[in-house]
Image (tube, rainbow, N blue to C red):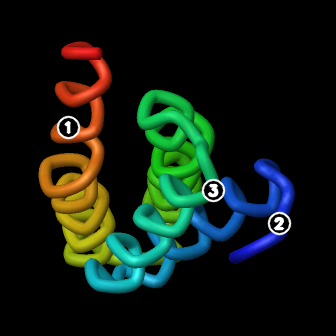
């Protein structure tokens, strides 16, 4: 993810959510933070985008409920473990 544009980073975050792999979502979120992307932007433009795509796939009966839950849990884990602490850290500055 190094030397990528923010749009590419957001696309990689969305793809990570679509993989339903919590470790991949967390790793990709860490890389986005390392690129200097803001936590709110990561949530809105990356993780949120991926979750919307998962929701559409569920709505269209392309995936099962377990996939919807797995994607949400993966995004939540990245938010709780990486983004919330970063937001709190930035508020103190």
List x then y, in percent, for residue 42: 51, 43
Residue 22 or residue 26, whichever sits in front:
26
- Against 92, residue 6 (above or below) is below
State the residue position of label 3: 35
Which quarter of the rendered picture does the N terminus lie within?
Answer: bottom right
Quadrant of the image occupied by residue 30: bottom left
Q: Residue at x 27, y 78 (%)?
A: 22
Are the residues at dot 3 and dot 2 in contact (C-beta closer than 8 Å)?
Answer: yes
List x then y, in percent, for residue 41: 55, 32
At mark 3, the secondary structure is loop
Side of 89 relative to 45 (left or right): left
Side of 5 relative to 67 (left or right): right
**Mark closer to the chain start, 1 or 3:** 3
**Mark closer to the chain start, 1 or 2:** 2
**Mark closer to the chain start, 3 or 2:** 2
| Few, some or many residues within 10 Å of mark 1 (<14, 14–19, 20+) | some
C-alpha distance separating marks 3 and 2: 8 Å
Q: Residue at x 67, y 54 (%)?
A: 10
Side of 45 relative to 38 (left or right): right
State the residue position of label 1: 84
| Few, some or many residues within 10 Å of mark 3 (<14, 14–19, 20+) | some
C-alpha distance separating marks 1 and 3: 17 Å
At mark 2, the secondary structure is loop
Quadrant of the image occupied by residue 24: bottom left
């Amino acid at each position: 993810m190094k030397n990528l544009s923010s749009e590419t980073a957001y696309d990689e975050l969305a793809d990570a959510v679509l993989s339903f792999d919590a470790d991949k979502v967390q790793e990709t979120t860490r890389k986005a933070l390392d690129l200097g992307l803001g936590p709110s932007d990561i949530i809105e433009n990356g993780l949120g985008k991926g979750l919307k795509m998962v929701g559409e796939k569920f709505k269209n009966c392309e995936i099962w409920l377990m996939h919807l839950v797995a994607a949400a849990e993966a995004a939540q884990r990245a938010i709780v473990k990486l983004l919330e602490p970063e937001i709190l850290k930035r508020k103190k500055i």
